[in-house]
Amino acid sequence: MEQLILVIAKALVDHPDEVSVRAVEGDSAVTYELSVHPSDIGKVIGKQGRIAKALRTVVSSAAVKENKRVNVEILS
């Protein structure tokens, strides 16, 4: 799952070397913390959050196979 988020995020940003993903296990869900360069935050979020929503949808769809709940948080 982390690899999927990395591939998508690196394709969107100007500083792909500064993209990182960290998984935080919770009781009922896994939270993936996506860190990007501060100037790339807007590119990952998109207008009115459309890109962030699409990223979360893709990750949630991929997680259905594993029967897990996932969250994606975008950090600068």
Image (cartoon, helix red, strand yellow):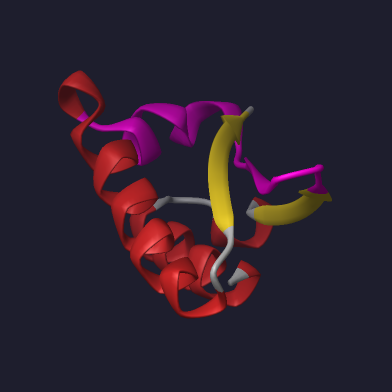
Name the residue rendered at 45%, 57% in the picture. Answer: 9
Q: Is residue 56 left or right of residue 67?
A: left
Q: Nearer the viewer, residue 22 or 25?
A: 25
Q: Residue at x 17, y 25 (%)?
A: 47
Quick check: 17 left or right of 64?
right
Whether residue 22 is in magenta: the answer is no
Residue that appears at 58% across and 72% down: 1
In the image, is 2 to the left or to the right of 45?
Answer: right
Q: Is 27 included in the stretch rendered in magenta? A: yes
Which image quadrant: the C terminus?
top right
Q: In the image shown, does 74 or 12 lie closer to the viewer?
A: 74
User: Where is residue 63 drawn, in percent x and y?
Assistant: 48, 68
Q: Position of residue 57 (x, y in %)?
A: 30, 52
Q: Nearer the viewer, residue 61 or 7?
A: 61
Residue lying at the far top in this picture: please name it. Answer: 48
Q: Is residue 8 above or below residue 52?
A: below
Mark count: 0
Q: Which residue is pictured at 25% across the width and 48% down the height?
A: 54
Which of the 4 image quadrants contains residue 71?
top right
The image shows residue 7, relative to residue 13, as above or below, that is below
Residue 17 position within the rendered picture, expressed as x and y whole percent measured from the top left: 65, 61
Q: Is 12 placed above or below 24 here?
A: below
Quarter of the image where one finds residue 50: top left
Q: Which residues are magenta?
A: 25-46
